Image: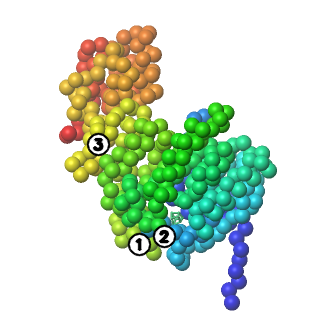
C-alpha cells in the first residue's frame, strides 16, 4: 500500500501557487535560480504594481479542491491528475505571517477553489484575512477574490479587510460565460457583486477606504469578439465601478472540455490591453477604437496608431498649442510625457524633436502626427493601412 504523505505548509504554497497563476494580478518575480535559492519552485511569489511602486506578493489559494466544472480550468471537479490541497485559515495566516516577517513578501493575493458553495469558500478566505489583521496585526496589502455566490455581508467584510477585490466575470456576457463555466451565473452571482460594491461604497462611513475592484476575462474559447469584451468593460469604467480589467489569453489544458480548442494568439491579449489603456487613461471612447467588421482589433498595429493614421496624419497636432487631451491622442505621447510637454512649453517653444524627446515622448512614433512650431518634423514611421 502506498503511504500518503501530507504536504507541509511550504509544499502547499508551491502547489497552490500553480493554480493561482490563472489569476492575472501580478507577474512572476523570481527567476528559476532565485526560486531555488529561496526554496520556492512555483510562481507563488509575484510582483504587483501599486501606486507607490512594485510590491512582491504571495499569490495563493485557500484550497485547490473545487466542485465547479469550469471548462478551461485545470482544477475543475473530477480532473484526476490535479493535486488537491487546502489550508485552514490559521495555517495560511501563520505561514503568510512568517513569510512577510522574513521579508520574502509584502502582500497577499488570496483566491480559492469552491467546496460546499461560494459562501463557505468565501468564509474561509475571510477568516484567513481576519486572523492576519487581528492576531498578527498585519497592515499590509491584501487582495481577496470574491467567490461566485458570496453574500453581500461577506463583500462588506472583504471591503473592510482588503486593499483590492476581484470578481472574475470570465466571459464577455452570460452567453459567453456559459461556454466557459456553465455552473457560474453571470446575472445571479457575478454582476450582483459589482452592483453591491457601488452600493456599499456609497453607504460606508467616509473613514473606510474602499478597495479597488478588478476583474478578469478568459479570452478566446467562447468565440467572443474584442468589441464584446470591451463594451462591458467600458460600461463599468464609465460608471467608475471597475479599476481595471485583466485579459487572460486562453491556453488549452489537457483533460478539460476545451482541450482541443486552439490557444489564443498573444497579440490578441496585447491589443486588448492597449485598447483598455486608451479607454482608461487616454480619453478614447469605445466607438473610436478601430474594430474591424467582426469586432476584432486589428493585429497589424496598435489601436492608437491606427486611429492616428486615420485622423491625424493629415491634421497633425501642434505640440505648442494642443490641450492635454489632444496631446494624448498622439502615438508616442502618454500621460507623463503629455504633462512634461505642458510643463516644458511654459518655459520655451518646442521647435525640434530633440526638445520633444526630453519630455519622454517616443519621437519615432509621434513625428508623423505633430507640428513643432508650425512645421512638420521629419517622419520616422511607415504608417499602417487604415
Ligand atoms: S471555480 Fe472554476 S475556475 Fe475556480 S477553481 Fe473551480 S473550476 Fe477552477
Nearer to us of marks 3 and 1 is 1
Q: In the drawing, what numbered circle is on residue 69?
A: 2
| CA–CA distance in space, label 3 to label 2 | 37 Å
Residue 361 image point, x, y percent: 39, 27
SS at mark 1 in the image: loop
**Which residue ends up furthest to the right in the rendered image?**
135
**Would you say the beta carbon of the disc 2 residue lies within 8 angstroms of ligand 1?**
yes
Nearer to us of marks 3 and 2 is 2
Residue 311 image point, x, y percent: 23, 30
Q: Are marks 2 and 1 in contact (CB under 8 Å)?
A: yes
- Name the residue: 67% across, 46% down: 161
Task: Look at the image and tell me in which quarter the N terminus lies.
Answer: bottom right
Residue 111, image quadrant: bottom right
- Name the residue: 40% across, 64% down: 178
Q: Categorize mark 2 by other alpha carbons within 10 Å: few (<14), some (14-19), many (20+).
A: many
Report which residue position mark 1 lands on. 257
Q: Is residue 258 left or right of residue 193?
A: left
Q: Nearer the viewer, residue 377 or 299?
A: 299
The answer to whether residue 172 is visible is yes
Residue 28 image point, x, y percent: 56, 52
Task: Look at the image and tell me in which quarter the C terminus lies.
Answer: top left
Q: Categorize mark 3 by other alpha carbons within 10 Å: few (<14), some (14-19), many (20+).
A: some
- Name the residue: 43% across, 11% down: 346
Residue 4, image quadrant: bottom right
| CA–CA distance in space, label 2 to label 1 | 9 Å
The answer to whether residue 102 is visible is no
Query: Which comes before the other along the chain, label 2 or label 1?
Result: 2
Residue 383 image point, x, y percent: 23, 36
- Name the residue: 43% across, 51% down: 247
**Can you say whether 247 is above or below 260 in the image?**
above
Report which residue position mark 3 lands on. 301
Amino acid at each position: 500500500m502506498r503511504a500518503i504523505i501530507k504536504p507541509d505548509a511550504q509544499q502547499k504554497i508551491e502547489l497552490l501557487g500553480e493554480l493561482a497563476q490563472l489569476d492575472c494580478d501580478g507577474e512572476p518575480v523570481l527567476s528559476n535560480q532565485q526560486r531555488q535559492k529561496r526554496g520556492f519552485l512555483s510562481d507563488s511569489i509575484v510582483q504587483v504594481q501599486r501606486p507607490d511602486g512594485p510590491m512582491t506578493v504571495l499569490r495563493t489559494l485557500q484550497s485547490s479542491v473545487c466542485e465547479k466544472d469550469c471548462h478551461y480550468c485545470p482544477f475543475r471537479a473530477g480532473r484526476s491528475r490535479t493535486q488537491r490541497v487546502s489550508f485552514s485559515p490559521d495555517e495560511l495566516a501563520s505561514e503568510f505571517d512568517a513569510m512577510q516577517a522574513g521579508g520574502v513578501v509584502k502582500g497577499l493575493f488570496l483566491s480559492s477553489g469552491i467546496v460546499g458553495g461560494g459562501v463557505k469558500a468565501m468564509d474561509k478566505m475571510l477568516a484567513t484575512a481576519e486572523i492576519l489583521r487581528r492576531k498578527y496585526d498585519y497592515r499590509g496589502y491584501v487582495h481577496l477574490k470574491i467567490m461566485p455566490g458570496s453574500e453581500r455581508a461577506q463583500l462588506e467584510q472583504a471591503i473592510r479587510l482588503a486593499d483590492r477585490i476581484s470578481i472574475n466575470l470570465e466571459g464577455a456576457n452570460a452567453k459567453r460565460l456559459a461556454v466557459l463555466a456553465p455552473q457560474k451565473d453571470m446575472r445571479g452571482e457575478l454582476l450582483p457583486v459589482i452592483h453591491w460594491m457601488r452600493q456599499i461604497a456609497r453607504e460606508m462611513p467616509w473613514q473606510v477606504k474602499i478597495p479597488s475592484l478588478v476583474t478578469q476575462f478568459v479570452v478566446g474559447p467562447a468565440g467572443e469578439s474584442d468589441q464584446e469584451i470591451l463594451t462591458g468593460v467600458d460600461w463599468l469604467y464609465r460608471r467608475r465601478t471597475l479599476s481595471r480589467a485583466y485579459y487572460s489569453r486562453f491556453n488549452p489544458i489537457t483533460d478539460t472540455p476545451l482541450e482541443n480548442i486552439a490557444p489564443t494568439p498573444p497579440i490578441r491579449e496585447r491589443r486588448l490591453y492597449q485598447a483598455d489603456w486608451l479607454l482608461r487613461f487616454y480619453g478614447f471612447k469605445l466607438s473610436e477604437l478601430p474594430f474591424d467588421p467582426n469586432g476584432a482589433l486589428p493585429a497589424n498595429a496598435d489601436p492608437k496608431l491606427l486611429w492616428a493614421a486615420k485622423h491625424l496624419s493629415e491634421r497633425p497636432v501642434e505640440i505648442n498649442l494642443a490641450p492635454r487631451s489632444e496631446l494624448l491622442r498622439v502615438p508616442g505621447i502618454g500621460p507623463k510625457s503629455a504633462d512634461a510637454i505642458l510643463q516644458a512649453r511654459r518655459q520655451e517653444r518646442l521647435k525640434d524633436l530633440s526638445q520633444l524627446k526630453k519630455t519622454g515622448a517616443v519621437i519615432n512614433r509621434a513625428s508623423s502626427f505633430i507640428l513643432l512650431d508650425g512645421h512638420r518634423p521629419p517622419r520616422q514611421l511607415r504608417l499602417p493601412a487604415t
